[in-house]
């Protein structure tokens, strides 16, 4: 009785395994083609406007000035530079 039950189980498992392996073999395998990734929804990795403020010392004629400069980095790669303030530094250049 045990042998009959065991043989029926083995035949039943083979019956399920053969169609599954045939299904995997029937699907075409495409390799080397381009992979396209489509995102739907809000884009989270957008480049944003980045602003920094720096100072520098410049000479105009015989006078020295400390300039505060605001540099804005735009998303398209351009930069915009603005002089925010210019203060004269006393003393000789």
Image (cartoon, grey):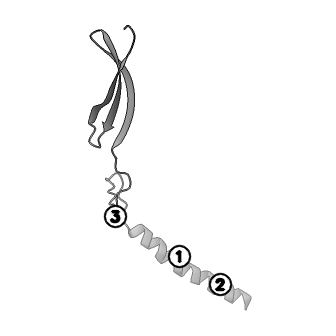
Marks 2 and 1, Cα distance to the nearest angstrom?
15 Å
The answer to whether residue 38 is above or below residue 87 is below
Quadrant of res 60: top left
How many numbered discs? Answer: 3
Q: Residues within 10 Å of mark 1 (few under 14, many from 20)?
A: few
The answer to whether residue 87 is above or below residue 46 is above
Tell me whether circle 3 and circle 1 mark residues in contact (CB < 8 Å).
no
Marks 3 and 1, Cα distance to the nearest angstrom?
41 Å
Give residue 41's mark. Answer: 3
Q: Of marks 3 and 1, which one's residue comes earlier in the chain?
A: 1
The image shows residue 25 at horizontal and vertical percentages of 42, 67
Quadrant of res 24: bottom left
The answer to whether residue 27 is above or below residue 79 is below
Q: Residue furthest front?
A: 90
Tell me whether circle 2 and circle 3 mark residues in contact (CB < 8 Å).
no
Q: Which residue is mark 1?
A: 17
**Label 3 residue SS:** loop
The image shows residue 6 at horizontal and vertical percentages of 68, 84
Disc nearest the viewer among 3 and 1: 3
Q: Of marks 2 and 3, which one's residue comes earlier in the chain?
A: 2
Give residue 75's mark. Answer: none
Q: Which residue is mark 2?
A: 7
Q: Nearer the viewer, residue 9 or 43?
A: 43
The image shows residue 70 at horizontal and vertical percentages of 33, 34
Q: Residues within 10 Å of mark 3 (few under 14, many from 20)?
A: few
Q: Quadrant of the C terminus?
A: top left
Marks 2 and 3, Cα distance to the nearest angstrom?
55 Å
**Label 2 residue SS:** helix
């Amino acid at each position: 009785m045990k042998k009959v039950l065991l043989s029926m189980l083995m035949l039943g498992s083979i019956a399920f395994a053969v169609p599954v392996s045939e299904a995997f073999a029937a699907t075409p395998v495409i390799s080397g083609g381009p992979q396209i990734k489509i995102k739907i929804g809000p884009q989270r990795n957008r480049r944003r406007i980045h602003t920094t403020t720096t100072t520098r010392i410049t000479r105009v004629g015989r006078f020295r000035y400390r300039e505060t400069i605001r540099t804005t980095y735009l998303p398209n790669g351009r930069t915009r530079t603005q002089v925010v303030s210019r203060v004269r530094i006393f003393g000789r250049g």
